[in-house]
Image (cartoon, rainbow, N blue to C red):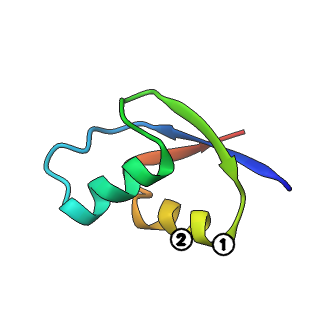
């Protein structure tokens, strides 16, 4: 299946608890960290929830 690379570009300090947990479930713990996850609808929804903290890397 296809994969997608996600990079955390902003700090999660000050973000609501649910957004912090979403970042952890995506595998992001530090700024500038890049993870590669499967491109599924649930992952797309998590990215949409924290779109202001992450970017999709090509």
Depth check, front residue: 54 or 20: 20
Please, what secondary structure does the residue beneath circle 1 have? Answer: helix
Whole-percent x, y for residue 20 in the image: 28, 53
Circle 2: is it few (<14), some (14-19), or many (20+) Cα within 10 Å?
few
In the drawing, does residue 56 fall left or right of residue 28?
right
Q: Quadrant of the C terminus?
A: top right
C-alpha distance separating marks 1 and 2: 6 Å
Residue 41 at x, y = what percent? 66, 72
Q: Position of residue 11 (x, y in %)?
A: 27, 38
Horizontal side, residue 20 vs residue 35: left or right: left
Quadrant showing the N terminus:
bottom right
Q: Which one is in front, 40 or 48?
A: 40
Which residue shows up at 72% across the image and 58% down it? 39
Q: Which residue is mark 2?
A: 45
Query: Image quadrant of residue 6?
Result: top right
20 lies left or right of 53: left
Q: Position of residue 29 (x, y in %)?
A: 37, 35
Q: Is residue 21 above or below residue 57?
A: below
Image quarter of residue 51: bottom left
Left or right position of 44 against 16: right
Identity of the residue drawn at 59% across and 71% down = 42
Q: Are marks 1 and 2 in contact (CB under 8 Å)?
A: yes
The residue located at (58%, 36%) in the rendering is: 35
Q: Residue at x 52, y 45 (%)?
A: 55
From the image, tell me which residue sits under label 1: 41
- Assign a secondary structure to mark 2: helix
């Amino acid at each position: 299946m296809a994969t997608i690379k996600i990079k955390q570009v902003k700090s999660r300090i000050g973000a609501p608890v649910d957004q912090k947990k979403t970042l952890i479930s995506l595998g992001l713990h530090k700024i500038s960290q890049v993870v590669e996850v499967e491109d599924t609808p649930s992952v797309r929804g998590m990215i949409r929830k924290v779109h202001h903290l992450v970017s999709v890397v090509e």
